[in-house]
Amino acid sequence: MGIISGPVDGGKHGWPFAKSMLEVQSFGYQEAEYFIEGEAQSYRQVEGSEWGRDGFWQAEPHKRAPYKTRLLVYRPADPKKFNGTVIVTWNNVTAGYELFGADSLEVLEGGYGLICASVQRVGIEGLPPINQGLAGWDPERYSSLSIPSDDYSYDIFSQIGAAVGPDRDLSTLDPMAGLPVKNVIAQGASQSAGRLGTFVNAIAPFDRSFDGFILSIYFGRGTPLEVGDELVNINNAQYSESPADRLRGANLIRDDLDQPVFIVNSELEAIACYGVRQPDTSKLRWWESAGTCHVSQQSRAARKLMADRDELVTPSDDQGINAIPIGPLYDSAFYQMHRWLSEGIDPPIQPRIEFDDASGSIVRDDDGIAKGGIRLPQVEAPLAVNSAIPLKPDIFAYLGGSCHPFSSDQVSVRYGDRGGFLDEFESAAKSAVEEGVLRPREIIRLTKEATESWPA
C-alpha cells in the first residue's frame, strides 16, 4: 500500500495541474492534492492462457518497482453532504498531458467524492516535442514524481482506490478526511476506458479495490499489460492502419464478476464496438448515444479554457466537428451507478443504435441522423445533422465527427418559429430525464444553449 503525503501546495503556478475550472468552494467542496508513493506490482499474461475475444483473461504478478505520483481530491466539506460514493477517475493522457472530469455538476451537487488519479508515465513526463506533463509544467511541485512504466499503472490505480476506500487505514493521513466511504467506482474515458477494460478482464477477478466500473467512450478493446518503455502516443508513426481499423472493438467484457460494469458510448464507439456488443444483464449496462461523437465543439471549448489558464498547447481545429456533448450522459451514469451500488436500483436499459447487419453500418433517417439509441434533445429536435462521420481521414477528425447545420428555410419548415422549436426541444429534454439519461438540471442548461443556437 502506498504512503500518502500532503496536502501539496506551492510550486510555480500555485495550483494543481488541470484543476477544476469551477469554484468548487461555492458548491461546498474542498480541493486538495496529495502524493502517494511506494512499490507497485506489474502483471503479465499467465503462460499458456489465451488473451482471447471472450475477455476471460488470466494475469499474474510479475515485477515490482518504486513509484511516486499524485491524486487530486474533491470532497464535500460537510460530512452530511457526502453520499458515500467515491469516483476514482483514471486520468487520460492521450493529449500528452492529463485530462479528467473535475467539472461534473453531478459530482459537486450530488455529494460524491472524486479522485483524479495520475497513473501513467505520459502524465508526468509528457510527450515530445512539447513536454506538457506534470514535471515539465511545474517542476517545483512535481519533479519528484516518477512512474517507471505503464506496466505498473494498474496496480498504482488499485492502490489509490484502496487508499480512499471503506477499508483504508484511518490512523494515517486520509485523503477523504474521515468521510464514511461505502462504495468506490473506477471510471475512465477513451484510452483510460481501454485500460479499465483490461483491469476488469484480467485484474478485477482477484482485486477488490473497486465496487463498480464505468467505461466511457470505450472502443471495445483492452490495452496490453506489458508495454515496457513505450509511451501512449496516438501520433506514433508506426500506425499504418486507418483510425477506424486501429480502434475497432476486439474483445468482450467478462461477465462473471460481482462488480457491475457501465459502458457509455457515443455513436463513434458504437460503430467500433458493433462486433463486440453485449446484452444488458444484472451486472452490465451498455448505453449508446445517437448523434454524438468522441469529442464535441463544446468539450473542445471547455478544454481550451483550461489550457489557456494552464498555458498549454492544444489542437485548435474544431471547425465543423460534432456539436452534441456527451458529458451529460456521464453525469447520468454516475447517478445511476451510485443508486445501483448503494440502493440496488438497476439503471434503465436503453435502446441501441440501429445497424444494418449486412453492411455493419448505422441506419440513418432521411436527414442523415442515426436511428435508435439514446436520443438527447439535440437529436430529437435537431437544428443540424450531427454524427460520427468524420470531415477528414486523420485521427483527430475521426474523433470529432461532424455537424452540418440545417438552413434557415429547413428550420422554418420543420418548426415554424423559435417558439415551436423550443417547445419540441424542451419536451425532448424532459423525456430524456424521464428515461434516466439526463439529470433534471440539464433541462434549463440545454434549453438555454438551444435558444442561442436558433439561426438568426
Image: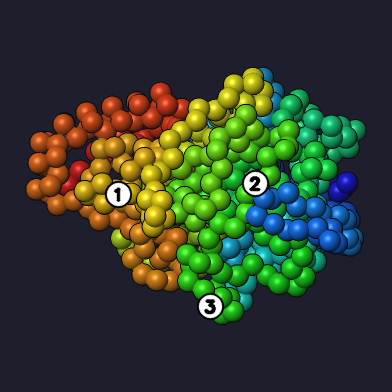
Q: Amino acid at mark 1?
A: Arg
Q: Between marks 3 and 2, how big is the CA–CA gap? A: 27 Å
At which x and y percent is residue 50? 76, 58
Q: Residues within 10 Å of mark 3 (few under 14, many from 20)?
A: few
Return the mark for residue 322.
Answer: none
Question: In terms of secondary structure, where does tag 3 sit?
Answer: loop
Q: Which residue is mark 3?
A: 240
Of mark 3 and mark 2, the one earlier in the sequence is 3
Q: Residues within 10 Å of mark 1 (few under 14, many from 20)?
A: some
Left or right of residue 19, residue 184 in this image:
right
- Mark 2 and mark 1: Cα distance apart in space: 28 Å
Label 2: element kind: loop
Q: Are marks 2 and 1 in contact (CB under 8 Å)?
A: no
- Above or below for 214 versus 108: below
On the question of residue 130 being in view, the answer is yes
| Residue at 84% across, 35% down | 168
Label 3–label 2 contact, CB within 8 A: no
Where in the figure is residue 267, as x and y percent of width and height?
Answer: 42, 50
Q: Which badge, 2 or 1, comes first in the chain's sequence?
A: 2
Front-most of residues 388 and 452: 388
Q: Residue 199: x and y, percent?
A: 72, 50
Q: In this figure, which residue is indicated by the disc labeled 2? A: 253
Name the spot of residue 91 as percent of width and height, x first: 64, 53
The tag on residue 364 is: 1
Q: Is residue 21 left or right of residue 370?
A: right
Q: CA distance from mark 1 to mark 3?
A: 30 Å
User: At 56% from the left edge and 42% from the top edge, which residue is drawn?
Assistant: 278
